C-alpha cells in the first residue's frame, strides 16, 4: 500500500516540505507528479523532503492530513525543515539517503524519453551501471568514517581539500555531477532560455548563438573524460570545462548546467562523434527551466 505524506506545509522560500515514512512512497508519487526533490533529510526512521512545484497536485492527491490539520502542526513542520538547512544549495535531488547509505536517485524521466538523441540503452549503462557504481563506491569509502553522516556536498568539499581522499572525491563528485546532468535535460528540451537567464547569457556571451558556440567548443575540446559547465563565479556567468570527476563546487563556483563528455555518455549513440552529441544536447535536450531554477536557487 502506498503511504502518503505524513505532514506537509510551505517553507516560506518557494518550496514545499513534507515528512514521509519511506523513500519508496515519496519517489513513486514524486515521479508520477513530476515533483523535484530539493532536499532530503533523515529524521530517525522518517524522511523530510523539501520539493518544488508542481507540488500542489502532488500534495492534493497524496497527503493523508488535511490542510487544517497541517496548520495545527506547523510548529512541528518548521522544526523538521530546520533540520534540513545543512543540505541547502542543491536545486535537485542529488541522492536520497537511507539510514546508512546514499541511494541512486531515479531518472527524472523514463529512460527512453530522450530518444533519439540519447537512447534507453545509453541510460541502461550510464545511469544503471556507471552512476550506480559511483554511489556504491561512495558509500563504501565513507562507511565507518567521520564523513559517514555528512551530506554529499559536504563530503565532496571535504575530499577536495584532502589529497589523501582523491578516490572519495572522484566517486562522490561523480554522484553529484550525474544527478545534476540528468536534471539538465528533458524530453523536448533545447530551444532558448528566457527571462533573467536569457539576459544573463546575452550579457555574458554577447548572444545565445555565441553562448552555444562557446559551450560546444568547451565540451568538444575537453581532452579525454570530463564535463562542460555553465557556472556562476563571483556573480558572473562563465563557461568552464573540468577533467574526470572535477566539479564546480570544488572551485567556489555554482553549477547551472553541464554536459557529460565522458565517452560512456555518448559512445553507444554517437561513437566518436562527440561534436554531434554536444550539438544534440544543446539543440534538443537542455532543460532551460532547470537551468533557470539553478540560477535563482
Ligand atoms: Fe557519465
Image: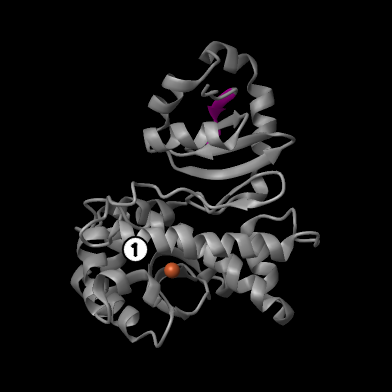
- Characterize the magenta stretch by its predominant secondary structure: strand
Residue at 67% x, 59% y: name it: 139
In the rendered image, the vertical position of residue 87 relative to residue 6, given as above or below: below
Query: How far across and how far down the image is residue 182, in percent?
Result: 40, 57
Query: How far across and how far down the image is residue 77, in percent?
Result: 64, 27
Task: Mark yes or no: residue 261 visible.
Answer: no
Q: Is mark 1 within 8 Å of ligand 1?
A: no
Task: Mark yes or no: residue 252 visible.
Answer: yes
Residue at 22% x, 71% y: name it: 279
252 horizontally vs 220: left or right: right
- Residue 8 covered by magenta stretch: yes
In the rendered image, the vertical position of residue 89 relative to residue 210, given as above or below: above
Give the magenta-colored segment's residue range: 7-12
Query: How far across and how far down the image is residue 47, in percent?
Result: 63, 36
Query: How far across and how far down the image is residue 259, in percent?
Result: 36, 69
What secondary structure is found at the residue carrying circle 1?
helix
Read off the residue under disc 1: 122
- Say which quarter of the image contains residue 237: bottom left
Q: Nearer the viewer, residue 61 or 141?
A: 141
220 horizontally vs 79: left or right: left
The number of numbered discs placed on residues in the rendered structure image is 1
What is the image's colouring? one colour
- Residue 245 covered by magenta stretch: no
In the rendered image, the vertical position of residue 49 relative to residue 224, given as above or below: above
Residue at 53% x, 59% y: name it: 132
Which quarter holds ligand 1? bottom left
Would you call the spot at circle 1 few (<14 residues within 10 Å), some (14-19), or many (20 or more)? some
Amino acid at each position: 500500500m502506498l503511504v502518503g505524506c505524513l505532514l506537509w506545509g510551505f517553507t516560506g522560500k518557494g518550496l514545499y516540505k513534507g515528512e514521509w515514512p519511506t523513500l519508496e512512497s515519496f519517489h513513486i508519487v514524486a515521479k508520477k507528479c513530476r515533483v523535484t526533490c530539493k532536499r532530503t533529510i533523515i529524521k530517525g526512521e522518517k524522511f523530510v523532503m523539501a520539493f518544488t512545484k508542481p507540488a500542489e497536485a502532488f500534495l492534493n492527491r497524496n497527503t493523508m492530513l488535511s490542510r487544517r490539520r497541517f496548520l495545527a502542526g506547523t510548529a512541528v513542520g518548521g522544526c523538521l525543515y530546520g533540520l534540513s538547512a545543512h543540505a541547502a544549495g542543491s536545486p535537485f535531488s542529488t541522492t536520497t539517503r537511507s539510514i546508512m547509505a546514499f541511494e541512486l536517485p531515479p531518472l527524472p524521466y523514463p529512460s527512453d524519453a530522450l530518444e533519439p538523441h540519447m537512447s534507453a540503452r545509453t541510460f541502461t549503462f550510464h545511469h544503471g551501471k556507471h552512476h550506480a557504481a559511483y554511489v556504491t563506491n561512495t558509500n563504501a569509502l565513507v562507511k565507518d568514517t567521520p564523513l559517514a553522516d555528512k551530506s554529499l556536498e559536504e563530503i565532496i568539499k571535504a575530499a577536495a581539500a584532502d589529497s589523501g581522499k582523491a578516490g572519495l572525491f572522484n566517486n562522490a563528485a561523480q554522484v553529484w555531477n550525474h544527478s545534476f546532468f540528468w536534471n539538465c535535460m528533458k524530453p523536448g528540451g533545447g530551444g532558448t532560455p528566457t527571462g533573467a537567464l536569457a539576459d544573463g547569457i546575452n550579457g555574458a556571451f554577447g548572444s545565445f548563438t555565441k553562448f552555444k558556440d562557446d559551450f560546444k567548443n568547451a565540451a568538444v575540446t575537453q581532452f579525454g573524460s570530463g564535463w562542460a559547465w555553465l557556472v556562476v563565479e563571483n556573480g558572473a556567468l562563465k563557461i568552464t570545462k573540468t577533467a574526470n570527476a572535477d566539479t564546480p563546487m570544488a572551485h567556489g563556483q555554482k553549477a547551472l548546467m553541464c554536459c557529460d563528455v565522458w565517452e560512456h555518455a555518448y559512445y553507444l549513440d554517437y561513437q566518436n562523434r562527440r561534436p554531434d552529441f554536444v550539438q544534440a544536447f544543446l539543440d534538443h535536450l537542455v532543460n532551460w527551466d532547470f537551468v533557470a531554477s539553478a540560477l535563482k536557487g
